Amino acid sequence: MRYELLLQSAVPGAPYDPDAAAAVLVARGATLEPNGALCWKVAGERVDVRSLKEGGQVVATEVLIPLGGDGVFVKEVLEQGLAVAAEAGCHLFDPQLMRALTPADAEPVALQYARTAKYAAEMAGASDVLGSAGYAGSDALSAGGYGATGGMSGQAKLFLAIAVLVALYLVVSGLGSALSGE
């Protein structure tokens, strides 16, 4: 799992020129991989960049951020991505937040990145992604109303299941007694 940003046409509905973004990325040190994707180093970390096609047409360039980073790394990718977008004449879009990004979006992007890393770690079993992304796991997410654990613990779920089964047993046995006339 990775966090995704998109380089897209600055004008909705207008054709997107992936070559302009690729040229800017290469000028900033991105290297072409054998599969046609670009490997872009940001703050010493690998960020994969590839074309996004719909109906055979390139509609955007995906910037795929690995989930093992921290808030500083994500903000650096955002800053660099915005610079690439400005140079290429397009905009940077965050599909998770559903909006084009500006420098003022650094905190919301970092918080959403932390939520995505936390989800991947807890639900998809990718605990390695919380490496340094756990930086915001409790404090930043709690501030957003997500709680430090993101849900009930295993013991709480077990206790709740037992309580539901006991209550169900009592209701069924009570109905059975009422129907048999006891």
Image (spheres, helix red, strand yellow):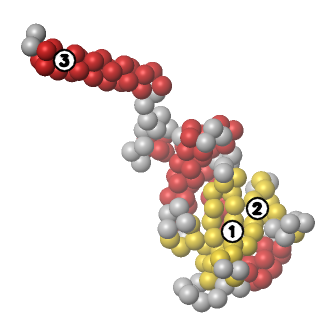
Does the rendering let one see residue 20?
yes
Looking at the rendered image, the disc whose residue lies closer to the viewer, 3 or 1, is 3
Residue closest to the eye, 139 or 180:
180
Residue 62: mark in rendering: 1
Q: Which residue is mark 2?
A: 48
Q: Which residue is mark 3?
A: 176
Q: Are marks 2 and 1 in contact (CB under 8 Å)?
A: yes
Label 2 secondary element: strand
Callout 3, which amino acid? Answer: Gly
Residue closest to the eye, 80 or 128:
128
The crowd level at tag 1 (other Cα within 10 Å; few <14, some 14-19, many 20+) is: many
**Horizontal arrangement in the rendering, residue 107 relative to residue 83 (left or right):** left
* Residue 161 position within the rendered picture, expressed as x and y whole percent measured from the top left: 38, 24
Residue occupying the point 73% across, 73% down: 51
Does the rendering let one see residue 114?
no
Label 1 secondary element: strand
* Residue 158 position within the rendered picture, expressed as x and y whole percent measured from the top left: 43, 22
Callout 2, which amino acid? Answer: Asp
Residue occupying the point 76% across, 61% down: 48
Residue occupying the point 64% across, 88% down: 15
Q: Residue furthest top?
A: 182
Residue 23: mark in rendering: none
